[in-house]
Each structure stands twice: as C-alpha cells, then as structure tokens.
Image: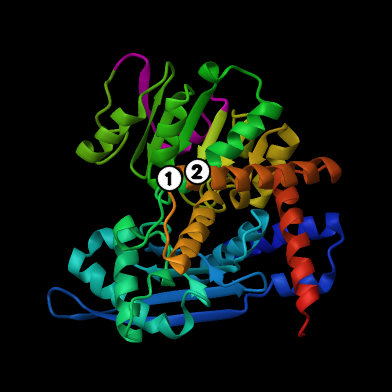
Amino acid sequence: MSLFENTLTQIQKAAKLMKLDPNVETVLSNPDRILEVSVPVKMDNGAIRIFRGFRVQHNNVRGPYKGGIRYHPQVDMDEVKALATWMTIKCAVVNIPLGGGKGGVIVDPKELSLRELERMTRRYTMAISNFIGPDIDVPAPDVYTNPQIMAWIVDEYSKIHGKNIPGVVTGKSIAIGGSQGREDATSQGGVYVLEEVLKQYGKKDVKDTRVIIQGFGNAGSHVARMLHAKGFKIIGVSDSKGALYCKDGLNPADAMTCKIEGGSVGECYGSGEACEMMTNEQILVADCDILILSALENQITAANAAQVKAGIILELANGPVNPEADEILEGMGVKVIPDILANAGGVTVSYFELVQNNMNYYWTAEEVQTKLKTIMVAAWQSVHDNSLKFDTSFRAAAYISAMRRLEEAIKMRGGY
Ligand code: GLU
C-alpha cells in the first residue's frame, strides 16, 4: 500500500463509523491541486542540475492551505499527497482555521553546499510563487528544512512582490517575524497531550515511566529534553545512524553532545554496563512503557507491530504506524496517540505565527504556551470523547472529530 492509500484507508475507517456523507468523503479523498515543478540549479562546479519539486494543496474549505516543505532523497508525489491530506485533517483536529498542503523536493540536503541549498530553495520558491501567499498557501519546515530555509523563501517571495511578506511561511526565526515557542512546538504539543492521556490511562509514577524515542531531529531531541526535565526515565534514543538503550536511564543532553561530536546518538555515549548499542529495528521493539516515534513514516508495520512492548505510542512523526500495524496494536491494547493530534502543536504555533504577522504585534513565550495548551487539551478531549462514543481507536476518533468539522464547512459552503 502506498502512503496515500494508507491515508485513504484511515479516512474510510472513520467515515464508516461516523456515517460521513459519501460526498464529503469523495471531496476529502482528492487533493484540490497538484503541482510538480522543475528546479534547475547552478551547482558550485558550474553544471546545472535539475531537482524535482512538488506542492500539493489538499483542501482549503476551513482556511488557507498550510503545511511544511520536505527535502528528502526519497520524497515523491504520493508521499506529498498523503502528507497534505493529513495537514487538512490535523488542522481540523485542533480546530484552527487552516486547510492542508505539503511540499517536497527530491534532494539529499547533506550533499549540497550551503550556497547550492540556498539557490535551490530560491528557485523552488520562484517555481511555486504564483500558488503560495499568506492568504493562499503557507509553507513551513518539515523533514530536513529549517528556519534558515524559511528565511530564504521569505526573501525570494518578497523580492518577487516588491514588499516584505513575512507571512508567506511560518517556522521563521524570531529575527524575521517568527513566533516564540515555534521551534519546539511540535514536542510541546505532544507533551501536553501525553500528560492528558497519562491522567486517564497512566499506570505508573512518572519517575518509573520508561520512554524510548526514535528519531533525534527537531521533534525527538526536544521531546527528550522536556520529558527528562519532568522526571520521565528516558531509556532509549535513536537517529538514522544508530540507537542507544540504557536500562537505568540516560540524559538526553549527553546524547545530543554525542550526536554533535560523533555524528550519532549511538556513537560516543558512555559504555557503562547499563547501556547497549542497538539497531533502529531493535530499539522499536525494546522494552519500555512509552514509544515516541519522531522519525519518518512506516516504522511500525505488520512486520514488527506484534513485537512492540510499549503500552503507549506517541506519533510525533507523520504516518509512522501504518494501517495494518494499527489493527494489530489495537488488538494488543496498545494506545496509539495519532500524528494528527500528537504532532499538531507545530502547526498550531504556525497559526499563532501567522496571526502575529498579520497584527505585526508579538506575544510572549508564556502567552504562546498558554494558548497552545488550551488548544491541545481541547483537541484531546474531543478525540477522547469520540473514542468512547464510537468505541474506537484514538486515530479513528481524531478523524471523526476532524471530518465532522470539515463536513459542516463543506456542506455550508457548497459550490459543487
Ligand atoms: N511540518 C509540520 C507538520 O507536519 C508543521 C506544518 C506547519 O507548521 O505548517 O505538521
């Protein structure tokens, strides 16, 4: 099954449970607009290389298209369609007035010089510039994109339009109109939801709750820091090169030092008896209470779902558990906190960033935190209520919350 087919499977499951109007399901199963662009870039050696770029605008019935841009060698149109669809659903789960979109460029950014990366970003911006804008479609960071890349997009787009337009993207640095709290918003939102879930379903004291985190990028490293500070026992971390498992707990700050100095969290951590190196496959099924998936899609599948030891899975990545694995985990009683709820803190603070750009007036970190918490807790309550009402998983319940809101908007506006 392709990633977009996974998405459709999730939509279908919830649509059936909630008896969604089939016309609404049809609309939500078909992205509004699909762009594929050629991105020619003069490389440092003088040769022109063509990169392929995508932007999918899935649905804007509740507000402008919104969603990140991913730079990855394996990105393709099917993946971007899935990710764009999840953005529409995600924004509706947290009830913010935005739609869904996603972009991607097939590239391994680690192979490009900084200048090449800048030229590629500017050229991609130019290629999609007629289709984005603060009221139209607002990109943001995703896998291997960051505030520097957002700054180049703002600069290029503003040049084309002859004025400064910071609201064309979110996830910017504070220096050019970013929001307090955006950097770690995905993790912060996930922590707020996790705490609510543990209030209902937690079985142990925080200090005895053992956590494994797959992926040590933006989401993974911040969630590790936050949970460690709250007293959770972080016993495993991994990145694309390796994994480390310490049964008595580890300090994520040391793992970060290892990553910076040795290139991987698994490389240089103290070789004490309580620690062992693992492969990425092993860490996913190692003994723990909470497994946090913050890498890429399709990590838990029919091949490894039955071996999962965690009682709770928090999806900070998009699509890390596929539909077959979902069925198996549901049967095992594992609670999966789905991506469209768990990682929605990122786009929620992106929404705050847009609002602040529009007002040209900026909030304190405390204001951002308070507003984010209110939204995440309300979203969880709606998802939890639906999971009880329809006797279903948190994922299906989150789709039900989102698709009810989308259904209302689609029917109210009409126009088909
Ligand atoms: N890329 C993030 C996501 O998948 C953030 C999107 C945004 O802030 O627009 O949710």
Q: Is residue 372 left or right of residue 274?
A: right
Q: Is residue 55 above or below residue 393?
A: below
User: Residue at coordinates 72% horizontally, 42% vertically from top-left?
Assistant: 381
Q: Is mark 1 within 8 Å of ligand 1?
A: no
Pointer 2 with pointer 1, Cβ within 8 A: yes
The quarter of the picture where residue 140 lies is bottom left
Q: Quadrant of the C terminus?
A: bottom right
Estimate the spatial distance between the alpha carbons at disc 2 and disc 1, rounded to whole Å.
6 Å
Q: Amino acid at mark 2?
A: Gln
Relative to residue 176, is residue 335 drawn left or right?
right
Residue wearing tag 2? 369
Rendering coords of residue 215 (x, y %): 42, 42
Q: How many marks?
A: 2
Rendered residue at 39%/47% (across/down): 218
SS label for mark 1: helix
Magenta region: which residues?
272-289
Residue 273 sits inside the magenta stretch = yes
Residue 282, percent from left and from top: 47, 33
- List the residue tagged with mark 1: 365
* Quadrant in which residue 400 is drawn: bottom right
Q: Is residue 259 rendered magenta in the image?
A: no
Around disc 2, counting alpha carbons within 10 Å, would you say few (fewer than 14), some (14 to 19), or many (20 or more)?
A: some
Q: Is residue 236 left or right of residue 372?
A: left
Please name the amino acid that badge 1 sits on. Ala
> Residue 88 in the image: x percent, y percent?
62, 64
Q: Is residue 81 visible?
A: no
Place residue 155 in its image quadrant.
Answer: bottom left
Which quarter of the image is occupied by the N terminus?
bottom right
Q: Residue 87: x percent and y percent? A: 58, 62
